[in-house]
Amino acid sequence: QLQLVESGGGLVQPGGSLRLSCTASGFTLDYYAIGWFRQAPGKEREGVSCISMSGGSTSYADSVKGRFTISRDYAKNTVYLQMNILKPEDTAIYYCAADRGPGRCPRAQYDYWGQGTQVTVSS
C-alpha cells in the first residue's frame, strides 16, 4: 500500500526552526513531485511549497518565501521542508502529497497524501 509519512513537527518558539520530513512506504518518491500543505484550525488548506520530480523546479507560497526551503534526497527517499524564522501564524498541521510525473511546480492535483504532522509556534 502506498503511504506517505510526515515527521519533524513539534512545538517551537517564534523565530525558531524546524525541519519536516516526508518519506514514502511502499514506493519510491523518485517519480513524483512533492508538495507541502498546511491547515490551521478554522482555515482552508493552503499550499506551502512544491518540488518537481527532478528537483529543478520549486515553488513557495508568498507567506513563506525566504523562510522555508524545500529539498529532496533521492538516496533517502525523503523530501524535506526546512522552516526558519517561524511565526505563530505558521501554526498548523502540515501535510505532504505526491503527484506522479515530470513537470514544473506548482501542481494542480496530487495522488497521495500523508496523515500530517503538527507544528505549533508559540512562546
Image: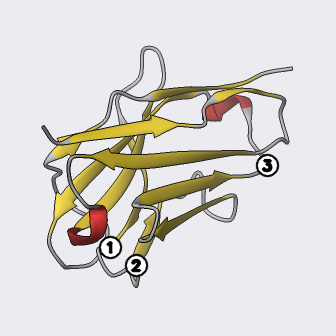
As helix, strand or loop, the secondary structure at mark 1 comes to: loop
Q: Which amino acid type corresponds to the residue marked 2 in the rendered image?
A: Gly
Spatial CA distance of label 3 from label 1 is 25 Å
Residue at the spot of label 3: 85
From the top left corner, tell me how far across and down residue 107 is, in percent. Answer: 23, 63
Q: How crowded is mark 3: few (under 14 residues within 10 Å), some or many (20 or more)?
A: some
Q: Which amino acid type corresponds to the residue marked 1 in the rendered image?
A: Ser
Image check: 42 left or right of 32?
right
As helix, strand or loop, the secondary structure at mark 3 comes to: loop
**5 in relation to 61, above or below:** above
Q: Quadrant of the rendered structure where residue 53 is? A: bottom left
Image check: 62 left or right of 99?
right
Residue at the spot of label 1: 52
Spatial CA distance of label 3 from label 2 is 24 Å
Label 3 or label 2, whichever comes before in sequence order: 2
From the top left corner, tell me how far across and down residue 103 is, in percent. Answer: 20, 79
Task: Indicate which disc residue 55 carries.
Answer: 2
Residue pictured at 72% horizontal, 29% vertical: 88
Q: Are marks 3 and 2 in contact (CB under 8 Å)?
A: no
